[in-house]
Image (cartoon, rainbow, N blue to C red):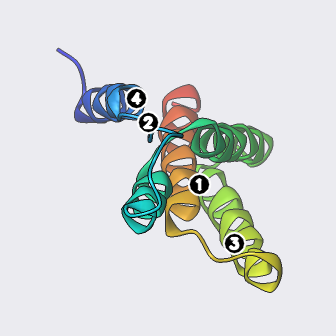
Amino acid sequence: MRSPSVCWASCLIVAMLVVPRVSSAATAADSVAAAASARLRLGADKWQHASLALSLGVGAGLVTRRTAPAVVVPAVLGLAKELRDTRHTRFDPLDLAADLVGAGLAGWLVSRIER
């Protein structure tokens, strides 16, 4: 039987693949709705955030041989990056959520590896 973490991660990956993309042919009348939908789209940018957080977390966890740094390091770096983005663009909570998903998966992987 699969653990709840594996089932949760599988559901998340499927959801990220299934979410429909916004059409580039949106009319001016629904441009506000299109912009809101585009923000909710889980595309390549979110995958980059999650995969980088996962990589950094696994690296930190394996170097320290502890689970906490595997979660804390990428979470703090993701938060710092989003706070820095407020100077140039805007804070994106979905980017931070993707960072936290990657950090959580890193913590789970390190806990499994370091048993």
Instruction: Measure the alpha-carbon separation of dots 1 and 2.
Output: 21 Å
Mark 3 or mark 1: which comes first in sequence?
3
Q: Are marks 3 and 1 in contact (CB under 8 Å)?
A: yes
Q: Are marks 3 and 4 in contact (CB under 8 Å)?
A: no
Mark 4 or mark 2: which comes first in sequence?
4
- Give the residue type at disc 2: Arg
Residue 6 in sight from this viewpoint: no
Mark 1 or mark 4: which comes first in sequence?
4
- Give the residue type at disc 4: Ile
Instruction: Measure the alpha-carbon separation of dots 3 and 1.
Output: 10 Å
> Which image quadrant is residue 71 in?
bottom right
Secondary element type, mark 2: loop
Q: Nearer the viewer, residue 3 or 32?
A: 32
Q: Residue at x 56, y 45 (%)?
A: 102
Mark 3 or mark 2: which comes first in sequence?
2
> Which image quadrant is residue 68 in?
bottom right
Mark closer to the observer (1, 2): 2
Is residue 94 depicted above or below 18 in this figure? below
- Give the residue type at disc 3: Glu
Instruction: Measure the alpha-carbon separation of dots 1 and 4.
Output: 14 Å
The quadrant of the picture occupied by the N terminus is top left
Name the disc covering residue 21, or none.
2
- Of all residues shown, which one is farthest toward the front? 28
Left or right: 105 in relation to 7: right
- Give the residue type at disc 1: Asp
Secondary element type, mark 1: helix
Q: Few, some or many C-alpha atoms within 10 Å of disc 4 (few <14, some 14-19, many ≥20)?
A: few
Mark closer to the observer (3, 1): 3
Badge 1 is on which residue?
99
